[in-house]
Amino acid sequence: MTSPRLLEVEQLTVCFDTARGEVYGTDEVSFHLDHGETLGMVGESGSGKSVTATSLIGVHPPLTRVRTTGSAKLEGRELLTMSEPELRTVRGAEIGYVFQDPLTALNPSLTVGHQLAETLIVHTGMDRAAARRRAIELLDLVGIPNSAGAVDSYPDQFSGGMRQRILVALAISCRPKLLIADEATTALDPTVQTQILALLRSLCRDLSMAMIMITHDFGVVAATCDRVQVMYAGRIVERGPVAEVLEHPGHPYTAGLLRLAPRFEVNHHHRLHPIPGRAPTVIKAKPGCRFAPRCELADDRCRREVPALSVDAAHAHACWHSPAKRATLTEDRTTR
């Protein structure tokens, strides 16, 4: 008998009530994640990646009225209807979250050891002495030099890369089943980024964790993920195994993102081809494909009807056009 999926999300819709009316963070998003699997979420800012992830732990912008519908089940337990006390037991203990900016995610007035120890005490019931010892072990695990001394240091005494490692230590401190890395390497230089990605991969392997990697960088996805889903304007427009999506993108938006990626094997005459137009900053319900205003292939049907994403195919894409027509957007990328 196969083990149940770790995470199953169905028709997740997050709607914010704003002065400009209803704004959708996500619209009927469905996906799954198996135990030990790494899933990449890719898309421009505002595509719904972070809203999807934060909805799983019940975190939304303050002073905002939010209506969430659909389903998100962690090992069969519905997350969306959990009370705040129930969600507090899930955050950290079962779902770890690595945020993009460690300066805002870490409390500057508390030592990193205190912050790690508090998480362990709350979620595992450790006494303070045991929690301090475990905090030192965790700092050592994520590569903080002189962890026994560093445990009593404050966040501003570390470099950006070291602070990000401390955030990782916090996120994995209770050995969660799922780790969410939300643009966790965006602000880091390439060398440190590579180190953090390698750290995340090794921790997922050693601790048998699944991971959702949120990023705008297909290079990060290629280095860390098993599957990828591409989001645009609150919807998933393509998903599939990483190698297949990178080699044979099925949606014009995915193809456009890949055309923007630098290619070091081509000659100096290679030019990047930006996607025309801009991604919508306010997402409202309307007919048709949301990418149609920026798509080179868009026709009347695209503007009138919403293309469906297959729920069965391993590699699926929400586009009305034939594979042959879509292929014209990706072929001969180095000379177009």
Image (spheres, rainbow, N blue to C red):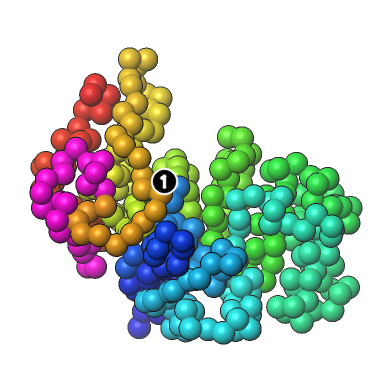
With 304 as the anchor, is 111 left or right in this view? right
Q: Residue at x 80, y 69 (%)?
A: 117
Q: Is residue 224 above or below residue 190?
A: below
Residue 244 is situated, as x and y percent measured from the top left of the image, at 28, 48
Q: Residue at x 80, y 58 (%)?
A: 112
Residue 52 visible to an observer of this rendering: no
Query: In which quadrant is the C terminus drawn?
Result: top left
Query: In which quadrant is the N terminus drawn?
Result: bottom left
Depth check: 27 or 67 in front? 67
Q: Residue at x 80, y 54 (%)?
A: 108
Question: In the image, is residue 181 part of the stretch drawn in magenta?
Answer: no
Disc 1 packing (10 Å; few <14; some 14–19; many ≥20):
some
With 110 as the anchor, is 90 left or right in this view? left
Q: Residue at x 29, y 48 (%)?
A: 245
Question: In the image, is residue 309 part of the stretch drawn in magenta?
Answer: yes
Q: Is residue 236 above or below residue 83?
A: above
Q: Quadrant of residue 131?
A: bottom right
* Amino acid type at mark 1: Glu
Residue 307 is situated, as x and y percent measured from the top left of the image, at 18, 58
With 176 as the anchor, is 41 left or right in this view? left
Range shown magenta: 291-313
The residue singled out by tag 1 in the image is 44
> Does dot 1 land on a helix, a strand or a loop?
loop
Q: Is residue 83 above or below residue 228?
A: below
Depth check: 103 or 123 in front? 103
Residue 56 is situated, as x and y percent measured from the top left of the image, at 50, 71
- Looking at the rendered structure, the number of numbered marks drawn on it comes to 1
Residue 154 is situated, as x and y percent measured from the top left of the image, at 84, 52
